[in-house]
Amino acid sequence: MSTNDLYQDRRIILAPMAGVSDDAFREICLSFGAQLTYTEMVSAKALSYGNVKTRDLLALAPSEDKVAVQIFGHEPDTMANEAYELEQAMGDAIFSIDINMGCPARKIAGKGDGSALMRDPVLAAKIVSAVENKVAAPVTVKMRRGFEMGHETAPELAHIVEGSGAAAVAVHGRFAQQFYQGDACWDTIARVKERVSIPVVGNGDITSGARAKAMLEQTGCDAIMVGRGAEGNPWIFTDIKAVLEGSEVPTAPSASERIDIALKHARMLADQYDDNIVKMRKHAMWYLRGLRGATKARRAINDAVTYDDFARIFQEVLELQDQPEASKVEENR
């Protein structure tokens, strides 16, 4: 397959999100129409030390035939060696080795990793070249509009990493210093697309099928990547798929449907983590967002640990949905 065909059948992508896109969440998103998933980002340095928790982040979801593995770091040799080891261990399951040059978190960028690499294009190029020379899988790069506010470097950096062997780039249309504030600049994605000949994946502010279609049309990008828009909302992939195929857009999920998926998610985590599923807390809050009684439920979620804890909270919220509208204010106190 040529690099230009890389996303031919995988245009609808779940973004890598630390602490969010674990294998349970990826499995759910795949069931709703996501065509490609990424692991949570993993530290090349931690992998080199044999860190077990880091290795656990690479577990495949049951229906995941391919997965993009995202690594971060700033040492070319370490990045290349660990990418090679990952490829040897995971084989054909790897869709691509993705190099994180976009994470704005201070604990990542502050060590010279993630989005900090956008400030050092020479080092960024060395990393891409080192990894590309070590693995057979396509090497891709995820970046932001730039690091400093107002200083757009994505088009030039994309051109540089293309010359170093990158098979594709994904671009989030915000500066690293913005974190997630303000609107994503889709024009940046269009400028990157004009600057390179490899596929470009657009990322940022995709909240519906209509928004996904608009990004594809406005930027000319080859695929779209959904991040926060999928949190508590795997149905977004069904919506996107329907819009892009020109088929009937499904109705929004009911409260009962949302809670059914939340329960499924909790059960998957409980089976995997011996019923200690504090990591379900953030997901539970997202699933309940906007429902009657959600505020009260969030307080209980902060203390929830087991599947039964979450199931009880979800059932209480579900029962509130049938109460008269006049009760809504009282139940949210």
Image (cartoon, rainbow, N blue to C red):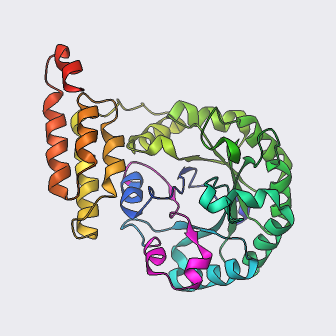
Q: How many marks?
A: 0
Q: Is residue 211 above or below residue 78?
A: above
x, y percent for residue 43: 58, 72
Outermost residue toward the top?
326
Where, quadrant-wise, is the N terminus in this rendering?
A: bottom right
Where, quadrant-wise, is the C terminus in this rendering?
A: top left
Q: Is residue 106 above or below residue 172?
A: below
The answer to whether residue 14 is seen in the rendering is yes
Residue 261 placement, left or right of 48:
left
Q: Is residue 328 above or below residue 82?
A: above
Residue 212 part of the magenta segment? no
Residue positioned 75% across, 77% down in the render: 76
Residue positioned 46% across, 68% down in the render: 65
Of the pair 124 and 93, the residue shown nearer to us: 124
- Place residue 169 in its image quadrant: bottom right
Residue positioned 53% across, 61% down in the render: 38
Residue 41 part of the magenta segment? yes
x, y percent for residue 130: 77, 78
x, y percent for residue 183: 64, 32
Residue 198 placement, left or right of 47:
right
Residue positioned 45% across, 44% down in the render: 230
- Place residue 120 in its image quadrant: bottom right
- Place residue 322 in its image quadrant: top left
Residue 103 placement, left or right of 122:
left
x, y percent for residue 247: 46, 33
Give the extent of the magenta segment: 31-58
Of the pair 70 and 136, the residue shown nearer to us: 70
The answer to whether residue 254 is seen in the rendering is no
